[in-house]
Image (cartoon, coloured by chain):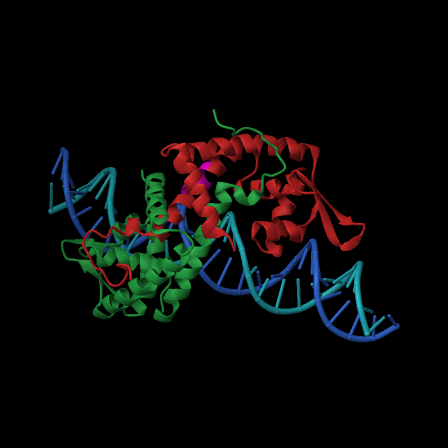
Chain colours: A green, B red, C cyan, D blue
DNA sequence: AACTGATCGTCAGTGTTGCTGATGATCAGA
DNA sequence: TCTGATCATCAGCAACACTGACGATCAGTT
């Protein structure tokens, strides 16, 4: 058993609690990322979609949504924006016309390349305070916690 | 220089990216926490406010909001709910009547005690896949990344 | 060939969250 | 007493992601 239970000790800073730390770490990285991507006209979640599309054969909207862990109805609006910006194209899948095939345009690929650089800088800034070894460990731990 | 730049290698799973991992770790813990607290009639952000109130002398709304990193206008609605549930009380600070002194009621303290137990279980479930040492390391890393 | 049930993308509506900007009460200092 | 700042509140707004419904399409059955 750990020292979990009630434990109303006076030194318990609310900001030590895991839920708080995780939320604010996420907020901070999101802010850095959005700022870094802003000159490219996209934000963090756009970049997420681009990443999936760039590393996959042309996918259906649903596949992309599931990979990102977002709802299929949310994906519609996200792609609307990216399509209007000329970054992706949608067309019916000839093999199954219920589906849309989503692809990066050539401009989309250029945007993605630039976004990778920008994101890399944001992530480096976020991780600047810890060592490369701690970074690897941190990433590995997150992977374990998230999986399944 | 790291291996940051373009790097369009085929093994780059979008789900390996730090922003993705952090977001989903946060989502997972939030879901566990809300589920654990739900029988008590509060959720994760309510618990956050309770934590601040329980470990501080009676504070103004603004102090609590700033500690939690949320907006003062958001705090109003949050406390409205907790007050309606009989968990906190608000009254004008005699020393500065612009301020509201916010305090846990007796029932609020009981709720907080129970919430601590419930949250502890949620956190343990979240961390079950990694060792205690890795947990400490993880917490320490988050602390460093978030601070300032 | 027609029927049935499931899947995909879309849309309207909803709930949550957190923000901005304005207002009224109050305080501190000139 | 006047002025400017502070605190809590409220209305309005924007982002986000969900539910539920719909039409189009597909696959399997009869």
Answer with left or right where residue C25 lies relative to residue B79: right
Q: Nearer the viewer, residue B23 or B40?
A: B23
Q: Main secondary structure of the magenta part?
A: helix
Answer with left or right where residue A64 lies relative to residue A3: left
Figure label count: 0
Residue B70 drawn at (x, y percent): 57, 53
Q: Inspect the magenta stretch and tell me whether residue B31 lies in it.
A: yes
Answer with left or right where residue B93 lies relative to residue D19: right
Q: Nearer the viewer, residue A48 or B142?
A: B142
Give the residue drawn at x 35%, y 48%. B21
Q: Which segment is the magenta one? A: B28-32
Q: Inspect the magenta stretch and tell me whether residue A148 lies in it.
A: no
Q: Nearer the viewer, residue B45 or A127?
A: A127
Q: Residue furthest top?
A: A1
Q: Nearer the viewer, residue A78 or A37?
A: A37
Quarter containing the C terminus of chain A:
top left
Residue B111 drawn at (x, y percent): 61, 33
Answer with left or right where residue B135 lies relative to residue A79: right
In the rendered image, the vertical position of residue D5 relative to residue A70, given as above or below:
below
Residue B41 drawn at (x, y percent): 57, 35
Give the residue drawn at x 51%, y 34%. B119
Give the residue drawn at x 66%, y 41%. B84
Residue B10 drawn at (x, y percent): 18, 54
Asked if one can make out residue B5 in the rendered structure from this viewpoint, the answer is yes
Asked if one can make out residue A99 in the rendered structure from this viewpoint, the answer is no
């Amino acid at each position: 058993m750990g020292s979990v239970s009630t434990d109303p000790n006076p030194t318990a800073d609310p900001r030590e609690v895991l839920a708080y730390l995780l939320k604010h770490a996420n907020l901070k990285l999101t802010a850095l990322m959005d700022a870094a991507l802003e000159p490219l006209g996209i934000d963090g979640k756009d970049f997420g979609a681009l990443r999936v599309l760039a590393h996959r054969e042309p996918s259906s909207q649903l596949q992309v949504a599931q990979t990102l862990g977002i709802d299929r109805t949310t994906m519609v609006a996200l792609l609307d924006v990216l399509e209007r910006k000329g970054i992706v194209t949608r067309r019916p899948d000839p093999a199954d016309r219920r589906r849309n095939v989503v692809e990066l345009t050539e401009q989309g690929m250029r945007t993605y390349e630039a976004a990778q650089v920008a994101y890399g800088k944001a992530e480096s800034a976020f991780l600047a305070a810890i060592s490369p070894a701690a970074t690897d460990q941190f990433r590995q731990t997150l992977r374990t916690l998230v999986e399944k």
